[in-house]
Amino acid sequence: MARDTGELEQFFRPDTRAPTAARAKRASPNRLGWAVQWGCVRMLGVCPTEDLSVVPYVVVRSAAEQLAVEAGEFAVEAACH
C-alpha cells in the first residue's frame, strides 16, 4: 500500500508532546527509533517490532530531519532488535 509524502508527514510530524518524549532518549539512534515507532503506531495502530527494515526510508529520513539526526542512525537502532 503506497502512501504519498504528504500523508506520511501527517502521521510522522510530531505533536507538541512528541519532541520532548523523543529528546528524553539518550542516544540519537534511540530518539530516531522511538520517533519512527511512534509514527507507525499513529498511522497503522501497531509498531513493526520483528523487522524494522520494513519501515520505508522516506519515513526514517523525515523523522531524522525533524530530530536533527542522521537517518543512518536508524540502522543502529534496527540492529538492536
Image (tube, grey):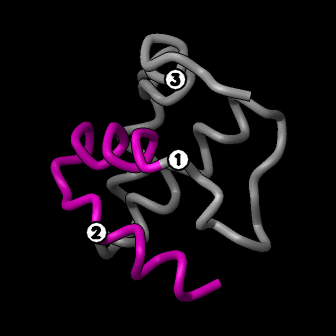
* Alpha carbon separation for disc pair 2 and 1: 13 Å
Q: Which mark is residue 8?
A: 3
For label 1, the residue is 56
Tell whether 52 sits left or right of 22. right
Number of the front mark, 3 or 1: 1
For label 2, the residue is 72
In terms of sequence position, does the residue under pointer 2 or pointer 1 come before the other? 1
Answer with the quarter of the image where residue 54 lies. Answer: bottom right
For the point 71% across and 71% down, which residue is it? 51
Determine crowd level at label 3: few under 14, some 14-19, many 20+ residues with C-alpha closer than 10 A.
Answer: some
Q: Is residue 11 above or below residue 33?
A: above
Q: Amino acid at mark 2?
A: Gly
Q: Is residue 7 above or below residue 18?
A: above
Q: Which residues are magenta?
A: 57-81
Q: Is residue 5 above or below residue 14?
A: above
Q: Are the two marked residues, 3 and 1, in contact with CB atoms closer than 8 angstroms?
A: yes
* Alpha carbon separation for disc pair 2 and 3: 19 Å
Residue 33: x %, y % from top left: 49, 62
Residue 52: x %, y % from top left: 63, 66
Q: Are the two marked residues, 2 and 1, in contact with CB atoms closer than 8 angstroms?
A: no
State the residue in front, 37 or 8.
8
Tell whether 76 sits left or right of 3. left
Q: Amino acid at mark 1?
A: Pro
Secondary structure at numbered mark 3: helix
Secondary structure at numbered mark 1: loop
Please check the rendered image and state whether residue 1 is part of the magenta-colored stretch, yes or no. Answer: no
Q: Amino acid at mark 3?
A: Leu
Secondary structure at numbered mark 2: loop
Determine crowd level at label 2: few under 14, some 14-19, many 20+ residues with C-alpha closer than 10 A.
Answer: some
